[in-house]
Image (spheres, rainbow, N blue to C red):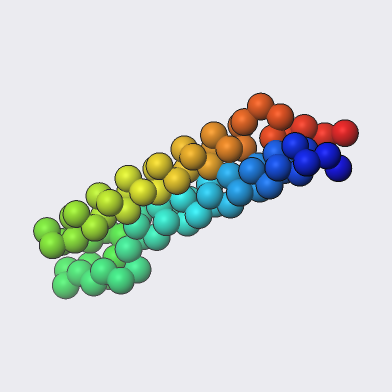
Amino acid sequence: MPHSDRRGAVLAWSGACLVVLALAVGALLLLQPWASCPDDSAPAACPVPADDVPLHAAGWVGAGVTGVVGLALVARPGSMRRR
């Protein structure tokens, strides 16, 4: 396997891993398993406390950027070339 093909495969796998990581972080932020509501038994239905808004915003932005970078690596021309 030539060096450029190996590099493309590594970038494609790295991109795919980044996309999976972004989806996992997004799901975690959506479901908020650490939250507790006094009124409800479903943590996902709880509003984000005011103290956690910056953390959630940073998490969503980070997940979005990670997903876009991962998709860019996967969609890179030549990254999924097969012989």
- Residue at the outermost top position: 77
Q: In this view, does 46 lie above or below 9?
A: below
Residue 52 in the image, given as x and y percentages of width and height: 19, 61
Q: Quadrant of residue 48?
A: bottom left
Would residue 48 be visible to someone looking at this image? no
The residue drawn where x is 26% and y is 69% is 35
Q: Which of 6 and 19 is in front in this view?
A: 6
- Residue at the outermost left position: 50
Going by the image, does 59 lie left or right of 16?
A: left
Residue 80 in the image, given as x and y percentages of width and height: 73, 35
Q: Nearer the viewer, residue 11 or 27?
A: 11
The residue drawn where x is 47% and y is 38% is 68
Would residue 76 be visible to someone looking at this image? yes
The residue drawn where x is 42% and y is 56% is 25
Q: Which of 49 and 74 is in front in this view?
A: 74
Going by the image, does 50 lie left or right of 21?
A: left
The residue drawn where x is 58% and y is 44% is 15
Q: Quadrant of the N terminus?
A: top right
Q: In this view, does 34 lie above or below 30?
A: below
Residue 49 in the image, given as x and y percentages of width and height: 15, 61
Residue 67 in the image, given as x and y percentages of width and height: 47, 43
How many numbered badges does the structure rendering display? 0
